[in-house]
Structure formats: structure tokens, C-alpha cells
């Protein structure tokens, strides 16, 4: 029996040509990734991404152009024996971002550390300037492919396509 997990991620590039990333501390490991998460039974990929942005950032987004879907075997970083298929879209915020945005990676406040003790996960968000953004910015293998792919694009064209 094979188990395949579908994940959906959004690339949010703002008008200042900065890329939004999520810094997460999960079960003792640090990850920098694109915002998003797992597809739930009964929802489509775009609905999943809208839900994930609301759950993680209390942010309504418009889901735009499809960028990439995993086209090779990738085992889950969290669950051995499970395959991950990730789908990436450009997204555009429909309102101002209300969650605190951090200036540096893994900058968690006291309230988040308290939550970690209960849930074993912490998440914060930050923008990375286009010039500083690269595949080395993100942790997960599929994210690295997408980061390289978008970095080879013109950020102005990406903004126009979302």
C-alpha cells in the first residue's frame, strides 16, 4: 500500500519584489518553506491554499497561476514511507497582512514558544528581498526546485502573472 500526501503552497511576491517565507520549528527541526499545507479530503487545491493562508496568517488570498507540480518521487521529510506531491501557485493578498512579520529567521516570541510546548510546532513569517532570495533560502527539496525556477524569472513578470 502506498501513501501519497498532497501539499499545496503559495508564492507571495509583494510590490517591493520580496518573497514571503514561513520559518517553522517542528519537532526539534528548523525549516524555511513557502506558506501552505496539506490537502484535506473533499477540497480542491486552490481551496486548500486559501484555507491554509487563513489558518496560518489570517490572510485572504487570491490564488493565481499554477507554477509547478512535483514530477518525480519525493519521500516525506516527516513520515518515512510516504510520498509527497506538492503543487505551487502564485498568490496575491486581498488585504493587508496582519500577522507580525519578522526581520530574521526563526524569530519566535514568548507566546509562540508557549504554543510550541503544547503543539510541537512554531511558525513565523518574513519577506526576503529578491536579491537575497535563492534556492538556498528554503529547506525542503521540492521548494528548492521552485525557488530556483522563480529566481530565474523576472520578478515584474511574476507580479503581473499572479
Image: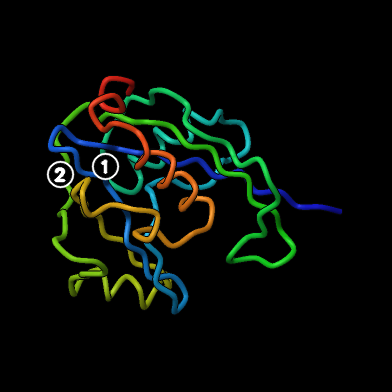
Q: Residue at x 67, y 59 (%)?
A: 75
* Local secondary structure at mark 1: loop
Q: Position of residue 112 (x, y in %)?
A: 25, 69
Q: Nearer the viewer, residue 120 or 78?
A: 78
Of the numbered discs 2 and 1, the one sitting upstream in the chain is 1
Q: Nearer the viewer, residue 141 or 83?
A: 141
Graded by Cα atoms within 10 Å as few (under 14), some (14 to 19) or many (20 or more), the crowding at tag 2 reads few
Image quadrant of residue 51? Answer: top left
Where, quadrant-wise, is the N terminus in this rendering?
bottom right
Q: Residue furthest front?
A: 152
Q: Residue at x 20, y 43 (%)?
A: 18
Q: Is residue 144 left or right of residue 151?
A: right
Q: Is residue 111 left or right of residue 64?
A: left
| Circles 2 and 1 in contact, beta carbons < 8 Å | yes
Q: Residue furthest top?
A: 160
Q: Nearer the viewer, residue 142 or 125?
A: 142
The colour mode here is rainbow
Graded by Cα atoms within 10 Å as few (under 14), some (14 to 19) or many (20 or more), the crowding at tag 1 reads some
Q: Residue at x 33, y 31 (%)?
A: 91
Q: CA distance from mark 2 to mark 1?
A: 7 Å
Image quadrant of residue 41? Answer: top right
Q: Position of residue 94 (x, y in %)?
A: 22, 26
Where, quadrant-wise, is the C terminus in this rendering?
top left
Q: Mark 1 — residue?
A: 58
Q: Residue at x 34, y 67 (%)?
A: 122
Q: How many marks?
A: 2
Q: Position of residue 101 (x, y in %)?
A: 16, 54
Q: Position of residue 118 (x, y in %)?
A: 39, 74
- For residue 146, the mark is none
* Local secondary structure at mark 2: loop
- For residue 98, the mark is 2
Image height check: is 67 above or below 138? above
Amino acid at each position: 500500500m502506498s501513501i501519497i500526501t498532497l501539499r499545496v503552497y503559495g508564492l507571495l511576491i509583494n510590490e517591493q519584489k520580496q518573497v514571503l517565507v514561513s520559518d517553522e520549528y517542528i519537532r526539534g527541526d528548523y525549516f524555511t518553506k513557502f506558506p501552505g499545507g496539506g490537502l484535506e479530503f473533499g477540497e480542491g487545491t486552490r481551496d486548500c491554499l486559501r484555507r491554509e493562508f487563513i489558518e496560518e496568517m489570517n490572510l485572504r488570498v487570491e490564488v493565481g497561476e499554477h507554477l509547478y507540480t512535483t514530477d518525480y518521487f519525493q519521500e516525506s521529510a516527516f513520515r518515512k514511507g510516504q510520498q509527497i506531491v506538492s503543487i505551487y501557485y502564485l498568490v496575491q493578498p486581498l488585504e493587508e497582512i496582519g500577522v507580525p512579520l519578522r526581520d530574521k529567521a526563526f524569530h519566535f516570541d514568548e507566546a509562540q514558544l508557549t504554543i510550541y510546548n503544547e503543539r510541537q510546532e512554531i511558525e513565523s513569517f518574513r519577506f526576503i528581498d529578491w536579491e537575497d532570495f535563492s534556492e538556498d533560502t528554503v529547506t525542503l527539496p521540492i521548494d528548492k526546485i521552485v525557488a530556483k525556477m522563480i529566481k530565474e524569472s523576472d520578478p515584474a513578470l511574476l507580479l503581473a502573472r499572479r
